[in-house]
Image: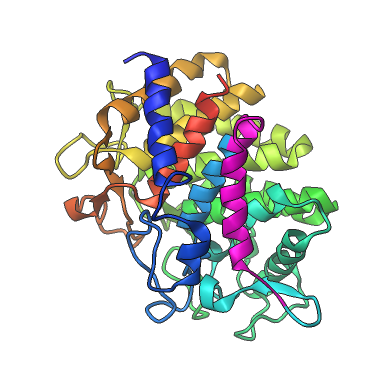
Amino acid sequence: MDLQNVLGKARTYIDGLTVDSEENVPGAVTADEHRFFTWDNEHRTPSGKPYLFDWSYYNGVVMEGLYDIYAASPDTGRRYYDYVKEYLNSMLEEGADHTVSLNQRRAGYVDCHGADCYKTAALLVKMTDGHDNYMKLASALYRDLTDTAHVNSKGNIVPLDFMEEELGYHYWHSWAGGKAPRFKVWLDGIYMLQPFLAHYAAMTGDQGQLALIRKRFQWVAETMLAPNGMYYHACNSRQDFCAFHWTRAMGWYGMAMADVMDAAGGELIDAIRPNLKLFVEGMLRYQDESGMWANLADRKITGTNRLETSGTAMMVYTILKGVRKGWLDSSCKDAAVKAFTAITEMKLDKGGLQDIYMKAAADNTNNYENAAYYMPDEGKGSGPYMMAYSEMIQL
């Protein structure tokens, strides 16, 4: 299959899942708590979980992928923008005093949960004009994370209670119960929070937050890098870590670096660029001859440790964006194109985008090889696939 056919097959899939879908209509899905986007394989509800209903990170990455396709070609991509805008607008609620918040019945958002509740906010700062409701809501979410005088709904001040110096000023991955999981810093959480914080801080000139972001990424580079050139899924120190190299976790980290550099620019580019280069070089050593990466990237491919779609798509996005921006050598490009082609040829069929690993905990047990967790069209894979596609069409 030549590259144009690969891109055409990808576009047909993306459009069928989103803008051409009769089922995945944002306003209709978010208005009914018994309806779910088809990429939401967990079907989280307000009654089942007190957070992450329609305002979820897996919906967020799908919408951000669509926004990236629009941004790559604004003249032809307006309907992707409109689709994302319909979703965001369905989440907003304006009070009598003109304060803007997330519609609790639809969003399921709580300010005390943790990193995952803030991922979708990255869309707000991408789409705001600086004075609209998107900016008002982004400001409120930023306050929840950074204001040392703001007390949240559980009586905590997040940057004082859950952002410790010895953990590189990172946030705990979850702070809902006030008690940390064993591993507080997850690569996942870095992606959920840092691009939003970096973009908002750059827009508003918050140099203190930008300095903290720089320290956070340096802590990851110094603490979470393993001797084999890969990164731990989760970690508290060089002695206390989750010893599994999960490709998607590393993919979140790669995308976080690329997006923070893009959003903040300047000194953060200079600070993070060497770490991005080291990360990509390390990951390329484990790329399978097919072009993809295994779910556990440093282990042999088996029926339960399969070539995995979400992590591979994240690597494509990270590498191609790094090359396009001049942060990575152009010699990396071919590996990323090969990876995108492999996903599209091997994992995309009439049943959807296959072999997206749904979830894995960071408790240092091998819960990364559960065959039942390989699913089609999971948002954590279909969203990054859209992001990767957005970079492919800019080649």
Q: Is residue 52 in view from this perspective?
A: yes
Quarter of the image with the C terminus is top right
Q: Quadrant of residue 87?
A: bottom right
Q: Is residue 203 magenta?
A: no
In x, y percent, where is residue 71? 64, 35
Residue 225, visible in the rendered structure: no
Residue 135 falls in image quadrant: bottom right
- Location of residue 253 with respect to 178 vertically, above or below: above
**Position of residue 145 in the picture relative to residue 349 (left or right):** right
Q: Quadrant of the N terminus?
A: top left
Horizontally, residue 47 falls left or right of residue 64, namely left
Magenta stretch: includes residue 78: yes
Q: Is residue 197 above or below residue 277?
A: below
Q: Position of residue 341 (x, y in %)?
A: 36, 23
Residue shown at the point (66%, 80%) measured from the top left: 152
Q: Position of residue 219 (x, y in %)?
A: 59, 49
Report the residue at 60% width, 74% height from top: 103
Most foreground residue, 352 or 22: 22
Between residue 354 and residue 219, name the one nearer to us.
354
Residue visible at 61% across and 59% down in the picture: 88
Q: 90 or 285: which is nearer to us?
A: 90
Q: Main secondary structure of the magenta part?
A: helix
Q: Which residues are magenta?
A: 70-94
